[in-house]
Amino acid sequence: MYIVLLGPPGAGKGTQAQLLVEDMDLAYISTGDLFRKHLGQGTPLGLKAKEYMERGELVPDTITTAMVLDQLAAFDEGKSCLLDGYPRNLAQAQALAKEGKQVDKVLSIAVPEEELVRRLSGRLICRDCQTPYHVDFSPPKVPGRCDHCGGEVYRRKDDSPDVVRQRIKVYAAQTEPLIDYYKGKGVLAEVNGVGDVKMIQRNLQEALKGDG
């Protein structure tokens, strides 16, 4: 069984993916992990990807798909697998289908844009020890100062509201065709991503079992 997890930046997808993997004993593929593995080991696919990255270009879908297929082949045939970050667009979804890998369920975590902006633009980090904070959920005890080392707590440029909104737009442009594609195949389940982490996880598992 192949399961795809979708969610915009700030939806908590990484947290929910790890909980699904642990609670349901799933194999797991994260494209971020795959790229780090292939680049670190200097594999032929990693070297090809590095050429594009060094030129500041996007890695072609064919290379990403080849990495995913290579990892899928390493898993036990009877084990269900969660795909996180792949497919990222319609071309990748179609390439996966052409290779005979039938996606059984797509879980899409839905969060309103304003909530995503609030989550991401509120993130803070210590400049010295990298301890994370959030203006709403976990602010430092002394504004602008780290609780642990006293270093400066600041907001990264890529977490500014304008940049966050642009990241969300890019995700929507890439993913909306993908959502329509899987909706047409009858395998898409949209899950509300606002609320308690455990509640969202429960809803994801229910949707995965066909109850949500």
Image (cartoon, rainbow, N blue to C red):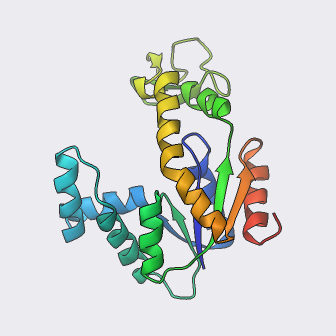
Quadrant in which the C terminus is drawn: bottom right
From the viewer's side, name the closer residue of 104 and 159: 104
142 with respect to 49 (left or right)? right
* Total number of numbered discs in the rendering: 0
Q: Residue furthest bottom?
A: 77
From the viewer's side, name the closer residue of 183 and 86: 183
Q: Residue furthest right?
A: 211
Q: Is residue 84 visible?
A: yes
**Above or below, comparing residue 145 to residue 71 in the picture:** above
From the viewer's side, name the closer residue of 200 and 189: 189
From the viewer's side, name the closer residue of 123 and 57: 57
**Above or below, comparing residue 119 to residue 200 in the picture:** above
Residue 201 place in picture, x, y as percent: 73, 56
Residue at image location 61% in from the left, 59% down from the top:
180
**Above or below, comparing residue 53 to residue 93 in the picture:** above
Q: Is residue 160 visible?
A: no
Quadrant in which the N terminus is drawn: bottom right
Residue 175 place in picture, x, y as percent: 53, 52
Residue 81 place in picture, x, y as percent: 55, 74
Residue at image location 18% in from the left, 62% down from the top:
47
**Above or below, comparing residue 158 to residue 179 in the picture:** above
Residue 138 place in picture, x, y as percent: 64, 27
Residue at image location 68% in from the left, 41% down from the top:
111
54 with respect to 75 (left or right)? left
Q: Quarter-wise, where is residue 196 in the image?
A: top right
